[in-house]
Image (spheres, grey):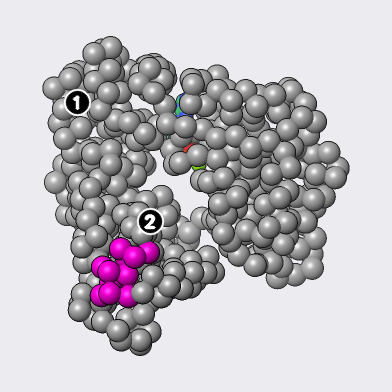
Amino acid sequence: MGHKEIWQNVLTFLERDLSKGVIATFFGAAELADLDNGQALILCPNRLALEQLRTRYRSQLAEAFRAVGGGECQFSFEIKPLENHRAPDLGPIFRNTPNSGLAPAYNFESFVIGLSNQLAASVAQAVTEQPGALHNPLFIYSGVGLGKTHLLHAVGNSVLEKAPNSRIIYASAERFTTEFIRSIQSQQTAASFRRKFRGVDVLLIDDVQFFASRTASQEEFFNTFNELFLAGKQVVLAADRHPAEFKNIEQRLVSRFAGGMITDIQEPDLDMRLQILRRKAAAQQAEVSEGVLLALAQQLEGSIRQLEGALHQLLAIARAQQTAPTEELLNTVIKTAPPAKPFVTPSDIIGEVCQAYRITAEQLCSSQRSREIVLPRQVAAHLLRQISKASLNQIGELLGGKDHSTILYGLGKIEKQLAADEILKNQVESIRGEILGKNR
Ligand code: ADP
Ligand code: MG
């Protein structure tokens, strides 16, 4: 295995218990520069990522290296030297440029269709027959790892196959935003941004929930959308929730989304999980017995990404140990995997928030109103709500007997801040990762 491949396997392993946000923020742009005699050198894109990897995520990193067959490692961390800093790949992705971003592997042929996704898949396919004509916009939503991104790429790839000159852009809302913000530095770049996004035949926007509230980029997206829509161009959107549940997206944009076709993807049933595993094993030319695939499909429910990750890990370990991927080996893999639904108690959440902000639980639950205490308290309320699904009254109780209206007010505030403040969002994501990672 080359360094790249090892690092990729490490990231796949980490996906099992760290959030996508944490991985993208701290691990994504890092690389494994050297691995020799158990000495691993990791190059980080910046100081923040370096500090996080060195302290907060070190044990997880070590575990991941062991799991992918890298053995027991000592880590050293450095910031990437500047000449190594490749310009971040922020350009939208035209397939007919060398910088092709439509992943060719994400196509309809490799997309297994079952009960849970058949509507979404058939509507997506219909879109490729006559882009702009039938379901416009098409809006696909689901929990993580269930195939939205795969479907968006499949639409793009399939349209290109039918009409190779089509102009297609796949971009996440985050990427649209970053690019937009860069573009407004000069009139020229602003104009070229517009030309690019408004000149497409098919626009594929992923993770729409990441548009931040009341920002110029959301406004820009609204205008882009309208122009494309009026010109009869196809727009396909994906998000982690139904448009009606967006809090940070303007009503007028939400009603545009609802004007086309909205469809969801559910979690796959056992049969479909098994079929997916067969496909993925075959794609890797790996021979895995039906019994092993079944055992894997039975034990991991929910996210297809997780399922895929476990298979990957099994194959990586088998390769490293030069043995067959047997059921015995699978059991060791699954033992290290988190249970499908980790059990987290409210005090785990409160404990982790206190640790992250270096305050005591007493302070958190007191009636102190200073910002150093109020922010952690609101973060705790937010996470109690999200992870434990606690009611307002329960949260009030847990946080020292506060009124439910106080909690409601606090939740509103923190959600607004999270939508507007990227750094805070990352902090909260990493606290969440820590909470979920500990309770395996
Ligand atoms: P989402 O965008 O919903 O989080 P992804 O599209 O990234 O999910 O899917 C996660 C992984 O699972 C990808 O590797 C994808 O190829 C795979 N996957 C998801 N759904 C299917 C499916 N129906 N058939 C085959 N692979 C799938
Ligand atoms: Mg996705």
Q: Position of residue 40 (x, y in %)?
A: 23, 51
Q: Residue at x 48, y 20 (%)?
A: 114
Q: Residue at x 70, y 24 (%)?
A: 126
- Label number found at residue 100: none
Q: Nearer the viewer, residue 7 or 427?
A: 427
Q: Secondary structure at mark 2?
A: helix
Marked residue nearer the N-terminal end (2 or 1): 1
Instruction: Say whether residue 334 is left or right of residue 247.
Output: left
Q: Position of residue 45 (x, y in %)?
A: 41, 61
Residue 99 sits in which quadrant? top right
- Asked if residue 324 lies in the magenta stretch, the reply is no
- The kind of residue on which mark 2 rests is Gln
Residue 103 visible within the image = no
Q: Position of residue 239 (x, y in %)?
A: 55, 45
Q: Which residue is mark 2?
A: 386
Residue 118 sits in which quadrant? top right
Q: Which residue is mark 1?
A: 330
Residue 263 sits in which quadrant? top right
- Asked if residue 398 lies in the magenta stretch, the reply is yes
Q: Nearer the viewer, residue 86 or 232?
A: 232
Say above or below: 244 vs 9: below
Mainly helix, strand or loop, the magenta region? Answer: helix
The quadrant of the image that shows the N terminus is top left
Magenta segment range?
A: 392-402
Mark in the foreground, 2 or 1: 2
Question: What is the crowding at mark 2: few (fewer than 14 residues within 10 Å), some, or many (at least 20)?
Answer: few
Say above or below: 333 vs 257: above
Q: Residue at x 32, y 75 (%)?
A: 402
Q: Nearer the viewer, residue 272 or 62?
A: 272
Asked if the residue at label 1 sits under 8 Å from ligand 1, the reply is no
